[in-house]
């Protein structure tokens, strides 16, 4: 049984959700750990409705969900734009399962509501929390407020973050992607940038227009566009296309959120090259296939 749990978790974490589902389905007896691993897998891959369905399966098998299961489901709802369902589950777990709202639940709800533009409701959640909100919760509201151009709430959240973490404010506000690592191999560099130039021309032929809104430097538009094409995920894509054969899946790992323009570029490249691209950043796997993203452009 332990090997089944490990298999479910392992396949999900390495981007193979289908294999994870197969392992889960073959389990003769599913414990709380089994259900928890499966809902976490659905969350990682942006499959919100499937994550919610786990609750029905657990109820049918008389397994009571714990804090971890509900947290994963709320996060899955957040990244699948299932606001009403997430709100329903948030209140259901308190009434039907008699669970007091943990900090993780509040965090999920702030992210869920803020991401969808329900900023005043997200702010209300923070203000009425039964526990003291952390700087992370205010940072989540700050990010959402900036995303939806709500200056009033952005100022309130930014001040809270600053007051709670004066020495680390910069860690919450990412103005732009880091530049690629120092270039050392001239030949490799030349081939990669030649491939990037080729991709750029192909994308423009199909209507691609760069979105430089994520570049906050006060420079010419042409320079901003060049900075976008120095983003690490684009260098990785070019390198992968040069060094792997047709039809091979391309896997990329990042430690920061992907910018909107890179997200568009990944979709277009997947369509132009016929390649599936799986990009992991933080705790999410984006699957780009034939010009579409598994998160439906909502992340």
Image (cartoon, helix red, strand yellow):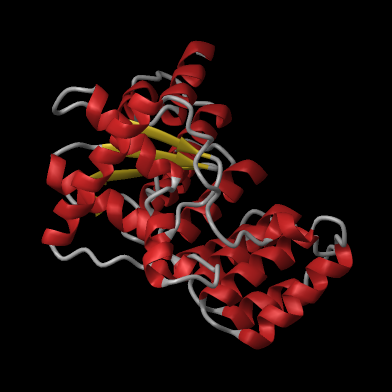
Instruction: Kindly indicate the quadrant of the structure image that contains residue 237.
Output: top left
Q: Position of residue 20 (x, y in %)?
A: 37, 27
Residue 48 visible somewhere in the drawing: yes
Q: Position of residue 231 (x, y in %)?
A: 44, 48
Q: Residue furthest bottom?
A: 152
- Which sits in the foreground, 292 or 237? 237
Residue 41 higher or lower than 134, as above or below: above
Judge left or right: residue 181 versus residue 212.
right
Instruction: Kindly indicate the quadrant of the structure image that contains residue 113.
Output: bottom right
Q: Position of residue 108 (x, y in %)?
A: 61, 59
Name the residue: 43% across, 64% down.
224
Residue 7 higher or lower than 278, as above or below: above
- Which sits in the foreground, 250 or 87? 250
Judge left or right: residue 169 versus residue 205.
right
Name the residue: 49% across, 65% down.
215
Quarter of the image with the C terminus in it? bottom left
Q: Position of residue 115 (x, y in %)?
A: 52, 68
Name the residue: 42% across, 48% down.
230
Judge left or right: residue 197 versus residue 254.
left
């Amino acid at each position: 049984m332990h090997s089944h749990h490990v298999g479910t978790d392992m396949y999900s974490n390495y981007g193979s959700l289908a294999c994870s589902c197969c392992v889960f389905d073959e389990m003769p007896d599913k414990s709380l750990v089994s259900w928890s691993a499966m809902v976490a897998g659905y969350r990682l891959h942006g499959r919100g409705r499937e994550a919610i369905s786990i609750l029905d399966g657990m109820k049918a098998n008389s397994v009571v969900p714990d804090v971890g299961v509900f947290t994963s489901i709320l996060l899955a709802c957040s990244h699948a734009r299932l606001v009403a369902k997430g709100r329903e589950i948030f209140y259901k777990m308190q009434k039907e399962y008699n669970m007091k709202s943990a900090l993780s639940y509040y965090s999920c709800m702030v992210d869920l509501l803020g991401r969808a533009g329900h900023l005043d409701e997200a702010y209300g959640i923070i203000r009425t929390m039964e526990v003291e909100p952390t700087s992370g919760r205010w940072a989540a509201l700050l990010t959402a407020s900036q995303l939806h151009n709500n200056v009033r709430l952005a100022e309130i959240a930014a001040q809270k973050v600053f007051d709670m973490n004066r020495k680390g404010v910069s860690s919450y506000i990412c103005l732009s992607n880091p530049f690629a690592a120092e270039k050392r191999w001239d030949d490799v560099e030349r081939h990669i940038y030649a491939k990037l130039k080729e991709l750029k021309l192909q994308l423009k032929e199909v209507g691609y227009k760069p979105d430089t809104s994520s570049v906050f430097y006060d420079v010419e538009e042409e320079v901003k566009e060049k900075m976008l094409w120095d983003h690490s995920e684009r260098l990785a894509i070019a390198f992968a296309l040069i060094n792997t054969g047709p039809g091979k899946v391309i896997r990329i790992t990042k430690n920061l959120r992907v910018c909107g323009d890179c997200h568009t570029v990944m979709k277009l490249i997947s369509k132009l090259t016929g390649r599936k691209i799986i990009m992991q950043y933080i705790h999410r796997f984006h699957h780009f296939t034939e010009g579409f993203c598994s998160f439906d452009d909502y992340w």
